[in-house]
């Protein structure tokens, strides 16, 4: 190879580098306060930047939890297509922002690697059935749907982030049997679950679901990030603590629930709760006293209020801070099979992220388990507070600034944060 | 025959005594009756006084008067009043003791029971509520009312599972739930069991047709995928007018009014069907769905023909662009025929007949009819009909007669917007620009014409006139071709994009997406800086999505958003982009 040709190659390389690096070394600031046109898609733009190998920063408590991203033509294009508001800032402006962050309850957390996302959901479920898949779809964040077969075959190891929604891990199909046993969709659901249990070598649906719960427990213990909503929160806990207890009614496994189930529960195996009391009646549409609102039980049902996000120290508690980043501190509550978590059954080490002040329940909790973390968010759909089966799906293009949905997407992004040594 | 004086006296005495006793009896009876009337008047006064106080917002003052009236014949109304005022002042629990008394006194009065249940529910006394229900069931065995009331209360609170349990208990206790169809219908809808809900609504409507609006309200949220099943239930044999009416209402709400008419068109001709047709027509008229209004009104005429109904049907036919049907409904009689009330005819049937004749290609007949009734027309009607006749001549290709027709209306006709249209058809844009601006009729055609002539600087463009003339003659395909030809002429080069856009709209309306897409592409590629370019690209993307080419639609939408970031169409483009990428649920 001639000297000239190698010189030309070097020159070409230099030229390509010079063309790709912006002359002014600008950054894109994606504000997340009220100036943001589409909060939900801003998460998608950030997540996809990380997925493609770029890095960014999450400016906790700065302008509603703004994102700082490299200023590239592709980033600008994506933000424009998504309708995400951004400001190009130069080094001087960035310096001023960093100074403000240093002097306030704010922090800048590096975002490095987009987590691989799995959503535990039946193969036939539509994205619109679950608030998380709704949000992921709308934000343009890819995910893989997994269900019992994949979990049983060990596929959880392929993912960093796992979401659960309205699965009933006690195997009682959310006690919908009480009301919907004649509905074609319920008959089909029951049949699918019975077939799956048989196919995977379990004696009953509850046995299968408890084993899936156990594998999810191990996933978190090994370092996975778990985010659960609605009935999955409560039933996962019951299935883990009741691993060796018959929790299910006779309609699903042929035997009634163990009369002594309350006493036999091993709450050490659970992430978030302790000493909860199980609902023994198969005719009462409730699993336990973990849920504060008991939406499907006449006489116990509690009205919806609002919940308040806790203002954490961004520098000392970056993880809870990330989980509560929002442009609103008070959010309208919304029902789900499990809407909230009774204070009396929460383990002392749990971090309460949001609560209804004065009420005997909290809405949003988080904690560590083994090498991983779990986060529970009560309720079904933040923009459909009275959600009922058969309701039209939520169209997030009509709720693109939803503070309730932002909390979901905070969870998707927080595993991307690089752990920083705590300031002491 | 002699009569003993004593006997006579005795008789007289006896007679006096009898009269006296009658008087006494009358007095004895009359005294309490009068007292009762006075008492009742007093009670009624108390009740009405209480109502007055309640209306004035003096709830605390109204409460004792309502309580007083509980012991009168107005007890039911008084109780309802007491319920209202106690709720206002937060004393609902004070209603329970008098309710116990009233129920003991009359255990079969369902209003007392309903108020009791409502009160207990509002106070959150679930145990007492259940006890009250049980007592009602025991006191009125075989009566569906307690189940109905309880199920309703639970449904109002969204407790579908509990309401379902109540319905099942009713079935067990009563042996049937025929009396609870309304509650079952509402319950099934709340549970998302739309087909079952439709079945129950059908049964409920059969006995209570007045529930039609409630049925429509409850079934309107049926997801698109389940609507076919609901249709099947409501259309099933035997034909049931209330069910068909409900389906027609649902179809209107679901945005498929033509299917609404299909639900009604086969009904047997009787008074109930005629009412259904007329009601449907009224809604169609309100929404300016003239073909549907025409069909429904013509159907109603099969049952009973009245002059008013005939005029409505003819009007709908003219507006639907069906002059033949209008003339069939209102046949034009010969010039020698006698019209009993010419003034009335000039107000009602003649304008419709003249417009229909002009539209159907018989402008000469229209002109004769207008001349015959001219002296009875108001100036406004005369202007409209002169214009209609002139356009009739335009449609039949005789521009000279059209102009003559306008001239016959004097200087007013020559300076009218109709004259502006004639000028436009002749390609005389200079005159068209001036006269069309005077139009008071804001139609889409006028907006398009004004937008186009405003963009062209030349005063004469005959090719453009031909395009509009074809449009006036209802030759949309020919007009689309002519607009493209006009766009290619140098004289109209200022308006190339809007002319192509008009042609594309015509092609799209003719369901000729291939030609429409070719035109939109040409606008985007050749006239990218014009206002029509982003809208053309949006329509192009929509057409691609309709044809299932989501990837190509995404490319167009991305191009639009990035190329025209300031366009007012960008939010629509982003929504289309979400739909094309399946990022949000599809619209119905």
Image (cartoon, rainbow, N blue to C red):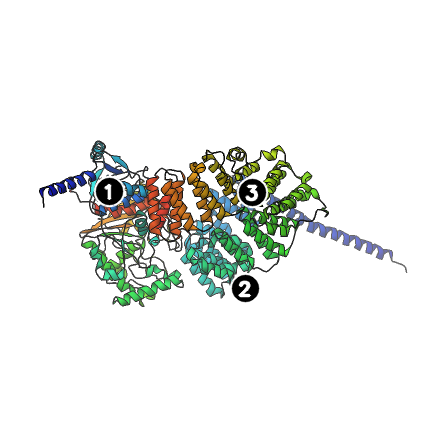
Seen in the picture, residue B279 relative to B430 is either above or below; the reply is below
Q: Choose top left, top right, bottom left or bottom right for residue A18.
A: top left
Disc 1 + disc 3, Cβ < 8 Å: no
Which residue is identified by label 1?
A: A321
Packing grade of label 3 (10 A; few <14, some 14-19, many >=20) is: many
**Do marks 3 and 2 both belong to one polypeptide chain?**
yes
Packing grade of label 1 (10 A; few <14, some 14-19, many >=20) is: many
Seen in the picture, residue B278 relative to A249 is either above or below; the reply is above
Tell me the SS state at disc 2. loop
Whichever of callouts 3 and 2 sits on the residue coming sooner in the sequence is 3
Residue A102: x percent and y percent?
20, 34
Residue B54: x percent and y percent?
53, 41
Residue A340: x percent and y percent?
31, 50
Name the mark on residue B51.
3
Q: What's the distance in space between the residues labelled 1 and 2, CA to CA?
A: 64 Å
Packing grade of label 2 (10 A; few <14, some 14-19, many >=20) is: few
* Residue A134 appears in view: yes
Report the residue that reaches farthest toward the right.
B1
Q: What's the distance in space between the residues labelled 1 and 3, CA to CA?
A: 58 Å
Seen in the picture, residue B454 relative to B139 is either above or below; the reply is above
Lateral position of residue B360 relative to residue B229, left or right: right
Name the mark on residue A19.
none
Name the mark on residue B238.
2
Closer-to-camera residue (B250/B583) = B583
Lateral position of residue A26 relative to residue B117, left or right: left
Judged by depth in the image, the label closer to the viewer, 1 or 3, is 1
**Do marks 1 and 2 both belong to one polypeptide chain?**
no
């Amino acid at each position: 190879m001639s000297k000239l040709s190698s010189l030309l190659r070097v020159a070409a390389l230099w030229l390509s580098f010079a063309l790709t690096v912006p002359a002014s070394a600008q950054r894109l600031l994606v504000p997340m306060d009220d100036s943001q046109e589409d909060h939900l898609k801003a998460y998608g733009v950030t997540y996809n930047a990380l997925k493609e190998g770029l890095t960014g920063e999450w400016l906790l408590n700065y302008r509603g939890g703004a994102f700082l991203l490299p200023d590239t033509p592709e980033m600008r294009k994506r933000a424009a297509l998504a309708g995400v508001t951004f400001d190009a800032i130069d080094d001087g402006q960035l310096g001023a922002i960093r100074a403000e962050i240093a002097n306030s309850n704010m922090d800048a957390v590096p975002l490095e690697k987009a987590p691989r996302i799995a959503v535990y959901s039946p193969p036939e479920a539509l994205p619109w059935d679950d608030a998380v898949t709704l949000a992921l779809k709308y934000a343009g964040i890819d995910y893989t749907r997994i269900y019992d077969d994949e979990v049983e075959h060990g596929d959880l190891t392929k993912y960093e982030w796992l979401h659960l929604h309205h699965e009933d891990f006690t195997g009682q199909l959310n006690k919908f049997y009480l009301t919907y046993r004649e509905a074609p969709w319920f008959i089909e659901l029951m049949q699918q679950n019975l077939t799956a249990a048989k196919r995977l070598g379990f004696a009953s649906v509850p046995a299968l679901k408890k084993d899936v719960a156990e594998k999810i427990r191990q996933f978190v213990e090994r370092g996975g990030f778990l985010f659960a909503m609605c009935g999955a929160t409560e039933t996962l806990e019951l299935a883990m603590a009741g691993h060796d207890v018959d929790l299910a009614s006779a309609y699903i496994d042929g035997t009634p629930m163990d009369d002594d189930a309350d006493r036999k529960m091993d709450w050490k195996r659970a992430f978030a709760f302790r000493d909860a009391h199980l609902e023994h009646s198969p005719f009462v549409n409730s699993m336990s006293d973990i849920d504060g609102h008991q939406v499907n039980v006449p006489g116990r049902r509690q009205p919806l209020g609002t919940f308040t996000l806790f203002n954490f120290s961004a520098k000392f508690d970056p993880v809870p801070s990330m989980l509560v980043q929002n442009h609103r501190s008070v959010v309208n509550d919304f029902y789900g099979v499990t809407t909230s978590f009774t204070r009396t059954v929460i383990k002392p080490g749990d971090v309460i992220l949001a609560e209804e002040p004065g009420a005997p329940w909290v809405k949003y909790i988080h904690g560590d388990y083994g090498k991983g973390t779990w986060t529970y968010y009560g309720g079904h759909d933040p923009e459909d507070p009275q959600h009922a089966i058969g309701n039209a799906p939520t169209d997030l293009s009509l709720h693109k600034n939803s503070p309730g949905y932002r909390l979901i997407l905070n969870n998707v992004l927080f595993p991307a944060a690089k752990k920083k040594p705590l300031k002491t | 025959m002699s009569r003993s004086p004593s006997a006579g006296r005795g008789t007289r005495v006896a007679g006096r005594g009898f009269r006296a006793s009658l008087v006494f009896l009358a007095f004895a009876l009359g005294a309490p009756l009068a007292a009762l009337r006075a008492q009742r008047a007093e009670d009624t006064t108390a009740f009405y006084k209480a109502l007055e106080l309640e209306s004035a917002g003096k709830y605390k003052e109204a409460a004792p008067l309502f309580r007083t009236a509980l012991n009168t014949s107005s007890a039911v109304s008084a109780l309802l009043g007491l319920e209202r005022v106690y709720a206002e002042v937060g004393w609902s629990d004070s209603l329970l003791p008098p309710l116990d008394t009233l129920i003991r006194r009359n255990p079969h009065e369902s209003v007392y029971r309903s108020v009791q249940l409502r009160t207990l529910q509002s106070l959150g006394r679930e145990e007492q509520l259940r006890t009250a229900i049980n007592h009602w069931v025991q006191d009125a065995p075989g009566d569906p009312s307690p189940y109905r009331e309880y199920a309703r209360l639970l449904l109002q609170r969204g407790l579908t599972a509990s309401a379902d349990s109540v319905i099942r208990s009713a079935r067990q206790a009563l042996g049937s739930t025929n009396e609870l169809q309304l509650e079952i219908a509402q319950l099934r809808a709340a549970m998302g069991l739309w087909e079952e809900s439709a079945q129950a609504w059908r049964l409920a409507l059969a006995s209570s047709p007045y529930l039609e609006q409630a049925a429509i309200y409850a079934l309107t949220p049926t997801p698109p995928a389940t609507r076919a099943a609901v249709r099947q239930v409501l259309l099933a044999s035997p034909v049931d007018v209330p069910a068909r009416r409900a389906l027609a209402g649902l179809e209107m709400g679901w945005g498929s009014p033509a299917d609404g008419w299909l639900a009604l068109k086969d009904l047997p001709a009787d008074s109930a069907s005629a009412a259904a047709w007329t009601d449907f027509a009224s809604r169609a008229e309100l929404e300016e769905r003239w073909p549907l209004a025409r069909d429904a009104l013509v159907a109603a005429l099969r049952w009973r023909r009245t002059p008013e109904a005939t005029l409505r049907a003819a009007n709908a036919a003219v507006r639907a662009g069906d002059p033949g049907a209008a003339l069939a409904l209102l046949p034009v009689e010969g010039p020698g025929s006698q019209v009993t009330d010419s003034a009335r005819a000039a107000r009602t049937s003649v304008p419709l007949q003249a417009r229909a004749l002009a539209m159907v290609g018989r402008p000469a007949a229209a002109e004769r009819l207008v001349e015959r009734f001219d002296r009875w027309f108001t100036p406004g009607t005369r202007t409209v009909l002169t214009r209609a006749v002139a356009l009739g001549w335009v449609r039949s290709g005789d521009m000279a007669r059209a102009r003559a027709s306008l001239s016959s209306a004097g200087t007013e006709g020559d300076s009218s917007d109709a004259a502006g249209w004639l000028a436009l058809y002749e390609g005389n844009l200079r005159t068209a620009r001036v006269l069309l601006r005077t139009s008071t009729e804001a139609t889409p055609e006028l907006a398009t014409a004004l937008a186009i002539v405003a963009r062209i600087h030349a005063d004469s463009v005959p090719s453009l006139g031909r395009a509009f003339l074809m449009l006036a003659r209802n030759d949309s395909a020919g007009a689309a071709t002519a607009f493209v030809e006009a766009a290619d002429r140098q004289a109209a080069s200022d308006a190339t994009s809007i002319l192509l856009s008009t042609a594309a709209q015509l092609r799209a309306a003719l369901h000729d997406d291939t030609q429409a897409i070719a035109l939109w592409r040409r606008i985007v590629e050749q006239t990218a800086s014009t206002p029509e370019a982003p809208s053309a690209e949006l329509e192009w993307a929509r057409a691609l999505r309709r044809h299932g080419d989501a990837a190509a639609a995404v490319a167009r939408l991305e191009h639009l958003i990035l190329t025209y970031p300031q366009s007012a169409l960008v939010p629509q483009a982003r929504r289309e982009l979400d739909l094309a990428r399946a990022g949000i649920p599809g619209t119905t």
